[in-house]
Amino acid sequence: MERWEPLGGGRILTSPRHRLTTDTLLLARFSLPRPGERCADLGAGCGGVALLWRLWGRPAHVRAVEVQEEAVRLLERSVAENGLEGAVEPLRGDLRDYKTLLPHQGLDRVACNPPYYPLGSGAQSQGRERALARHEGALSLELLAQCGRYALKTGGRLCLCLPVPRLAEALALFRDTGLEPKRLRLVQLDQTRPPYLFLLECRRGGRPGLAAEPTLLLRDETGADSPQLRKVYGDYWKGRP
């Protein structure tokens, strides 16, 4: 069943197959654009990152590229609901055709919450929508790097999140593609468990040098939401940070 949920001072339409996750909110915060930037959210789903960018950060324009028809339809309705026509542009398309979907060296920032697992690894997902979200098919890490190199201006930023076991792969791949890893933040559930997720920012044509930010804990010592997560959720529920 489709339903409207509060989002950053606006509303977003979700469905059982296309919904918001904590990873979406963390990536939106980590990759927040500067005012006036031109951006793209790749594999946008129902548009959580793209909509939060516009509601929180005021970029000039956001392309939200998604291959699944249902997700694009949800995003189109959310754009209209929030009065963001012309500011957030839903685009249905396969990123393997990135040269027709993205401007050549025309973007300041790109973000992506890519499929977490290479084909043939991890638990196999039931249903096409979940399989596309979890396993590389239409969007591999190599393809994401190609999209970023093609679409970003010199100095432009590519931001993504992935499970920690893929960190070494991502660092090597993006550096080899001309997208220098510059900023890293690990995410862990609580103090008793190791990090499970990383947030990474790469810069097109950037100089070597990676800055690690403090690890983001999702729960405090009592098991409740941490102050960092409460801030993200507070911004999500209440509006602009």
Image: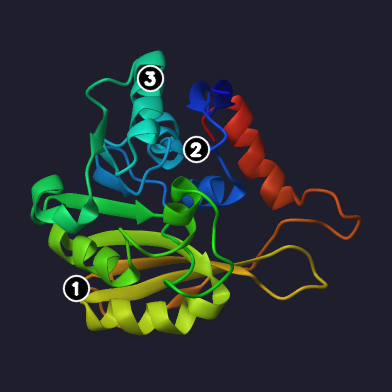
Q: Amino acid at mark 2?
A: His
The image quadrant of residue 3 is: top right
Residue count near mark 2 (Cα–Cα under 10 Å), binned few <14, some 14–19, many ≥20? many
- Position of residue 232 in the picture relative to residue 161 (left or right): right
Residue count near mark 1 (Cα–Cα under 10 Å), binned few <14, some 14–19, many ≥20? some
Residue count near mark 3 (Cα–Cα under 10 Å), binned few <14, some 14–19, many ≥20? some
Which residue occupies the foreground of this view, 196 or 9?
A: 196
**According to the image, label 2 marks what residue?**
18
**Residue drawn where x is 48% and y is 77% of the image:** 166
x%, y% of residue 63?
25, 39
* Tag of residue 21: none
Farthest right residue in view: 222
Check disc 3 and report its element: helix, strand or loop: helix
Q: Earlier in the sequence, mark 1 or mark 2?
A: 2
Q: Amino acid at mark 3?
A: Arg
* Tag of residue 205: 1
x%, y% of residue 177?
22, 77
Q: Can residue 226 be seen by looking at this rendering?
A: yes
x%, y% of residue 45?
41, 41
| Comparing labels 1 and 3, the label whose residue is closer to the camera | 3
* Tag of residue 77: 3
Height in image: 147 above or below 80? below
Which quarter of the figure is the C terminus placed in?
top right
Q: Amino acid at mark 1?
A: Gly
How many numbered discs, if any? 3
Check disc 2 and report its element: helix, strand or loop: loop
Check disc 1 and report its element: helix, strand or loop: loop
